[in-house]
Image: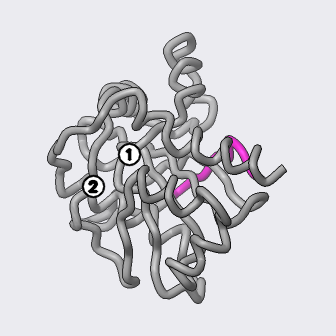
Amino acid sequence: MKKYLLTALIVLVGQTVLAQSPRAVDASTEEYAVYSAVIADRFAGTHYDRIVIQNVTESNDVTIETINRNERYFARMFPALKNGVARDYNIRNKEPLRFKDSLVLKMEYVLIDEKEIEKVFKDSAWEEFYKKYPNSGGLISLSRPGFNSGMNQALIYRQYWCDWLCGAGNYLLLKKSGDRWTVVKEHNVWVS
């Protein structure tokens, strides 16, 4: 059972990375502000010392196929979604982004690549992960965000794992007020 779940985790984490190797694309300050808000939202009020983040963006590929067939996919999820956000999300997520050390978080964070993930999960999996990254709360990965033309609304996919049967993947709708991004609505795609 553990071997099956390990294989599934590696496939989920690496599916976009295997499709194409990310080049050093520069993300905008707004993208990093959205990433920081989404990560802070997930770990708000927790007792973790650090956050472990996959260093390459990835999206929910199954959903992208659905979106390509039906442009109203996100509009049903988020009725307040502004024009252009879903289209921008699709365009940005055609090419993954390799994160730079540009997140603004109140906790320490570690960026790890697919090879490191495979290495940690090769034998003892979560036990090894938590030995290497104690009190981290698991592994998180993010898509690139899509924005509206006014750059005050964003859509992003976030997934995280904390053990064999502990994790979730969800889309988040964010809004910008002043210079601060906040999550206004979440839609779960999968939960374990």
Query: Residue 111: horizontal and vertical position, in percent?
Result: 35, 65
User: The disc labelled 1 sits on which kind of residue?
Assistant: Thr
Q: Residue at x 42, y 32 (%)?
A: 18
The total of numbered circles placed on residues is 2
Query: Residue 61: horizontal and vertical position, in percent?
Result: 53, 28
**Up/down of 161 relative to 130, above or below:** above
**Up/down of 59 relative to 127, above or below:** above
Residue that carries the numbered disc 2 in the rendered image: 99
> Residue extending furthest front?
123
> Residue extending furthest right?
1
User: The disc labelled 2 sits on which kind of residue?
Assistant: Phe
The part of the image, by quadrant, that contains residue 94 is: top left
The part of the image, by quadrant, that contains residue 53 is: bottom left
Disc 2 is placed on an element classified as loop
Q: Which residues are magenta?
A: 184-192
Q: Residue at x 43, y 59 (%)?
A: 116
Query: Residue 88: horizontal and vertical position, in percent?
Result: 32, 30
Q: Residue at x 36, y 32 (%)?
A: 93
Disc 1 is placed on an element classified as loop
> Between 21 and 152, which is closer to the camera in this rendering?
21
Mark 2 and mark 1 residues within 8 Å of each other at the beta carbon:
yes
9 left or right, relative to 147: right
> Residue extending furthest top?
69
Query: Residue 164: horizontal and vertical position, in percent?
Result: 75, 59
Let me know if residue 80 is in the magenta part: no
Query: Label 2 to label 1, Cα distance in Å?
Result: 8 Å
Residue that carries the numbered disc 1 in the rendered image: 57
19 left or right, relative to 190: left
> Between 94 and 124, which is closer to the camera in this rendering?
124
Specify the principal SS of the magenta part. strand
